[in-house]
Image (cartoon, grey):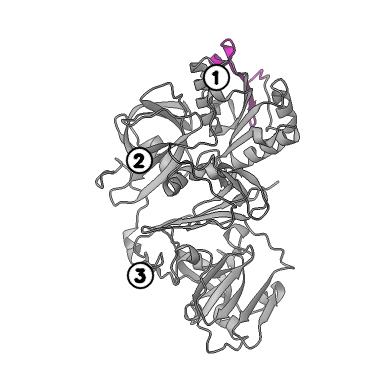
Amino acid sequence: MVWQLATVRAVRQETPRVKTITLELPGWSPHRPGQHYDIRLTAPDGYQAQRSYSIASEPERVGEIDLTVEWIENGEVSSYLHDVVALDDRLEVRGPIGGYFVWTAEMGGPLLLVGGGSGVVPLMAMLRHRAAVGSSVPARLLYSSRTPEDVIYAAELERLSRQPGGVEVFHTLTRSQPPGWKGYARRIDRAMLAEVLQPLGMQAQAFICGPTLLVENVADHLVQLGLPPSNIRTERFGPTGGPS
Amino acid sequence: MEADLMESLTLDGNAVAGFLEEIFGAEMTASPSQCASCGYAGYLGTLLVYLHAPGVVLRCPQCKGIVLRIVKTPRAVYLDARGVECIRITLRG
Amino acid sequence: MSDSFFSRGFTGRRREPENAKRVPPGQYITPDFPVLSAGPTQHVPLDQWNFRIEGLVRQPVQWSWQEFNQLPSQTFTVDIHCVTKWSKLDTRWEGVSVDTLLENVEIDPQAGFVTAFSYGGYTTNLPLADLTGGRAFVAYNYAGQPLAPEHGGPARLVVPHLYFWKSAKWVTGLRLMDADRRGFWEALGYHDRGDPWKEERYQGD
């Protein structure tokens, strides 16, 4: 597992606080959706800062990866990635890393994905992979955001959900909703999970990612609803929903 | 209800996946583990991680007991594995 | 990776030039107070809290929270240095000097070392000489407020002239000993003394 120099090929604003950076990797190798890369920044005086970012893109996209980064207040690395990084810049990265919180189509399903805030990023890699390989594994995403403007990948999720056999997407907006909103409008609770899980059944494989407290609450609820603990995989992102 | 600050900052084994791979030479988060204190069985990726301390501490999500402690200095790695029954390191095949 | 690579436009944390003399080698100044912990926050009810001095003393002594708060206290403004490279200047504390606490015991002349031990099981070892002469205290207020549990409250040891892992959070006592017994981090490679000005971070430094 070595550090390599990646080149920034694209930068895309997803929401006011979230950006996706496309990196071309000379030493790219296919990842498993759910894995992440580490980014290391080095100052001229040798000072270093390092953070992990989940891969947002599918492994079917050869040679490059998308990292979706939430801007964190006082975040050393996230503020650099948001405010300084430009096309053609080089970033030191290593990966892909991880092996527990991963899903590939051959693992089957049904699939229940639950994400809070930027926790949706690794789940998006799973969904993009699922679409790219034409998997027919039933899949549902329950995605919690604060406001409509905070929903990452909104248009793409809509498009994926309209494909035949596409993922069913359930949003919950916890702070404000657009006029005429018919979706969930509260924090994820047991009743909501019961509704979303019900058609998938107790064979469902659940992946939960986001702020630590959300992840723990959702995992508890799913166990109480009867999902076997061994069917549940979790990745905690700390208090705000961004990797530490 | 005010959430415990420390609780909301707690991460899991996924957050130290790269570090563990450096130390053990293999992907470790999907490695099974059993807590020597309470018998909890789960992948290393499910252990609670306390970071930003002088070293990495992995704790059992069930009893909060210490499962693994690792310190990496410029010269050496120190590992305290008394809290785990057994560590399984997958060999590259 | 080539030693000469650095990230365009990344400056990291700066060492303010006017404070340079107060910052030990390899450290960076931080305005925040990062929460570093090896485990879940300890929540100790005050009616169960106690602090004791034991080991190589003629008679061990113990204080309840009420008794501890009646001891003469002082305010201390000190710089603190964490081995993870952040330093914080002019931190303001209130607590009881370890000298004051040691006045209540008769120390065996063989006692050259101390293990500080805490609720939750944390321990750290240091020479007795580093706890005396006004250099250490048990603090219960920080920046004019009761010390928060995340930062080691109700009370923590503060030994500012050594790396901050020696300043045991949730401290519940001092054990005086004739031999140095490695504590939580020292057993895992950290230095027995930990002088930031000599960069004594690890064993053998």
Amino acid type shown at disc 2: Val
The residue labelled by disc 3 is C198
Q: Are marks 2 and 1 in contact (CB under 8 Å)?
A: no
Q: Is the residue A163 above or below the residue B68 in the image?
A: above
Q: Are marks 3 and 2 in contact (CB under 8 Å)?
A: no
The image quadrant that residue C168 belongs to is bottom right
Chain letter for mark 1, please. A
Amino acid type shown at disc 3: Lys
Residue C126 is tagged as none
Which residue, as the protein is rendered here, is positioned at the far top? A164
Asked which secondary structure carries label 1, the reply is: helix
The magenta stretch spans which residues?
A158-181
Instruction: Determine crowd level at label 2: few under 14, some 14-19, many 20+ residues with C-alpha closer than 10 A.
Output: few
The image quadrant that residue A2 belongs to is top left
The residue labelled by disc 1 is A157
The residue labelled by disc 2 is A2
Amino acid type shown at disc 1: Leu
